[in-house]
């Protein structure tokens, strides 16, 4: 009953919001006329994204219609060329809300005027009503994350001269678009340096009706977005910026929300009030984790374009001041930025933004990125069965969705939580051809063996996590649902150069390998799936691993929804 009431209230709020943005009261994306494009591509044409139509709307504004294999249909994308021409331009990915489309930021949000004297190329892709997530619609799947984080970057790389350096890739959005921006930043902290969310729901588990209802507008069925909030809780957390907040340590985070009221009226905007409360909780969570951020809870403001124009202008102004400050520091030859306490929430107005405060997150991330590329330690939280982070590729074969911690990652080893089987390929952090001792220690016991780094300096190995549960119920006096078993079990992997290799390297007066302590060579040096040499990119994945023939890769299952 309570869920039905929440759905009814949420549906009414979203209908009112959508009607306020469209004179006809219909969802704008439904009104897009693509008849002039003809039928959707099929066969070979449908296998790759491609531009179906493009037009020039102003000196800076371009409009494209792209066919997306991830979506299975054609969608619109608007691009604003840099106001200040650059040989290679930084990029702002600017996302619309759940009641708008790819035209909204330029039609209602003054994006063209606000970026007129800035060096950024601004890309504004369609987001539909898919909550920037992967959802089943009819007989197909609308994979919005793949469209936004894979196909759009490919489109930009092929069409424009832009920088893909982490500090030059920025995300921002309003309402549901801000949720998408923050989620993508948490999924890919190695790719995006800055993120901003204006009036956004950042904890889906606290706004289930809103997420379900917006997905219904896309054509999905009820409770199919991330599944049941109880039985499929891991899926909700895997798509939650709040749940994955610890991944944002080296990302420059900005968020803001109005109070839901204006000083001249007593009426309240319940939707803005709700996202304001979520912003407060999200900022508190970042503070607990010691993550630098900027949180601006406005004393007034509604869920409308007046507020979002103001917030976009404030964020762009902060970016410009930080950029100018960094340039002045470099000109003076000054030292590091002035540091504030870790986790301190910035509660000043946007006009008082201090480039040495919240803005230092991006600078700190730049140094951290270089350290990680050289073998520095990091950790990563995810719900995906297949992911790549900082050059490490991880595949997990499992029978249920779960949150995985890829922790304490360095050339000396790493840890993984959860159940099933894993396959990990390292970046090129090791000496090609050199022999290394591998020690896997987990709930199923130890396993030690040796292998040589491939010609690119990479190691590839497989192993077992906690035992996977094949039956839905574990029998016993107190039966427990299998989804909660094994989630927190930890498997650790240690990597070290073998003793004789280390001694040989010392005799040759070569540099020691970074990050790996020396251990004595184990007596047992065989592992049936770990001596194959270089791992092929075209090899098995988590979806087809059950047919690969490896005795260590037999608990195959479909990877969780929402893969990046």
Image (cartoon, rainbow, N blue to C red):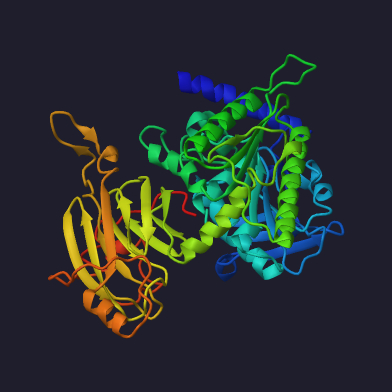
Q: Is residue 142 left or right of residue 486?
A: right
Which image quadrant is residue 330 in? bottom right
Q: Eyeballing the image, is 284 above or below 438? A: above
Q: Is residue 276 left or right of residue 420?
A: right
Q: Name the spot of residue 186 as percent of width and height, x first.
A: 51, 48
Residue at the bottom extreme of this rendering = 508
66 and 248: which is toward the camera: 248
Q: Is residue 522 left or right of residue 152?
A: left
Residue at 33% from the left image edge and 76% from the top image edge: 453
Which image quadrant is residue 41 in? bottom right
Residue at the right extreme of this rendering = 59
Residue at 22% from the left image edge and 67% from the top image edge: 519
Would you say residue 420 is visible in this rendering?
no
Q: Name the spot of residue 211 as percent of width and height, x first.
A: 54, 35
Q: Name the spot of residue 450 as percent of width and height, x first.
A: 22, 72
Specify the quadrant that holds the N terminus: top left
Would you say residue 155 is visible in this rendering?
yes
45 and 475: which is toward the camera: 475
Residue at 36% from the left image edge and 46% from the top image edge: 401
Q: Eyeballing the image, is 108 above or below 333? A: above
Q: Name the spot of residue 111 as percent of width and height, x first.
A: 78, 47
């Amino acid at each position: 009953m309570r869920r039905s009431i929440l759905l009814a209230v949420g549906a009414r709020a979203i209908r009112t919001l959508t009607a306020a943005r469209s004179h006809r009261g219909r969802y704008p994306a439904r009104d897009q006329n693509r008849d002039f494009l003809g039928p959707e591509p099929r066969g070979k044409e449908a296998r790759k994204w491609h531009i179906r139509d493009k037009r020039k709307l102003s000196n800076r504004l371009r409009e494209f219609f792209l066919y997306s294999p991830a979506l299975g249909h054609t969608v619109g994308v608007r691009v604003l060329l840099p106001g200040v021409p650059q040989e290679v331009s930084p990029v702002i990915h600017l996302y619309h809300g759940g009641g708008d489309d790819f035209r909204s930021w330029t039609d209602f949000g003054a994006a063209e005027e606000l970026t007129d004297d800035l060096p950024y190329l601004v890309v504004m892709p369609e987001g539909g009503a898919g909550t920037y997530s992967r959802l089943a619609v009819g007989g197909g799947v609308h994979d919005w994350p793949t469209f936004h984080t894979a196909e759009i970057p490919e489109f930009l790389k092929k069409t424009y001269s832009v920088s893909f350096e982490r500090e030059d890739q920025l995300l921002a959005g309003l309402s549901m678009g801000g949720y998408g921006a923050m989620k993508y930043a948490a999924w890919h902290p190695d790719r995006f340096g800055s993120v901003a969310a204006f009036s956004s729901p950042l904890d889906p588990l606290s706004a289930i009706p809103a997420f379900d209802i917006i997905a219904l507008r896309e054509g999905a069925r009820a409770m199919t977005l991330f599944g049941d909030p109880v039985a499929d809780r891991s899926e909700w957390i895997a798509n939650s910026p709040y749940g994955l907040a610890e991944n944002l340590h080296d990302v420059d985070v900005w968020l803001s929300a109005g109070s839901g009221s204006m000083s001249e009226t007593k009426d309240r905007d319940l939707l803005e009030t709700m996202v304001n409360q979520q912003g407060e909780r999200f900022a508190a969570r970042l503070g607990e984790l010691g993550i630098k951020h900027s949180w601006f809870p406005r004393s007034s403001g509604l869920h409308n374009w007046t507020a979002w124009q103001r917030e976009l202008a404030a964020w762009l102004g902060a970016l410009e001041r930080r950029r100018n400050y960094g340039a002045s520091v470099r000109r003076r030859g000054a030292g590091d930025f002035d540091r504030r306490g870790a986790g301190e929430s910035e509660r000043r107005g946007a006009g008082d933004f201090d480039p040495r405060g919240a803005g230092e997150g991006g600078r700190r991330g730049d140094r951290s990125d270089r350290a990680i590329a050289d073998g520095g330690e990091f950790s990563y939280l995810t719900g995906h069965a297949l992911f790549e982070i900082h050059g490490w590729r991880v595949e997990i074969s499992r029978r249920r969705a779960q949150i995985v911690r890829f922790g304490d990652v360095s050339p000396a080893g790493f840890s993984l939580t959860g159940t099933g089987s894993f396959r990990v390929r390292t970046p090129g952090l090791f000496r090609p051809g050199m022999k290394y001792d591998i020690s896997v220690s987990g709930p199923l016991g130890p396993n030690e063996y040796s292998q040589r780094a491939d010609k690119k300096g990479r190691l590839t190995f497989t192993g077992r996590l906690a035992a996977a549960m094949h039956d839905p119920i574990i029998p016993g006096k107190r039966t427990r649902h299998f989804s909660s078993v094994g989630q927190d079990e930890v498997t650790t992997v240690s990597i070290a150069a073998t003793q004789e290799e280390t001694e040989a390297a010392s005799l040759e007066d070569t540099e020691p390998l970074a990050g790996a302590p020396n251990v004595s060579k184990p007596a047992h040096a065989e592992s049936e799936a770990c001596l194959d040499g270089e791992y092929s990119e075209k090899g098995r994945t988590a979806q087809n691993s059950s047919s690969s023939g490896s005795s260590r890769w037999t608990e195959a299952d479909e990877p969780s929804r929402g893969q990046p």
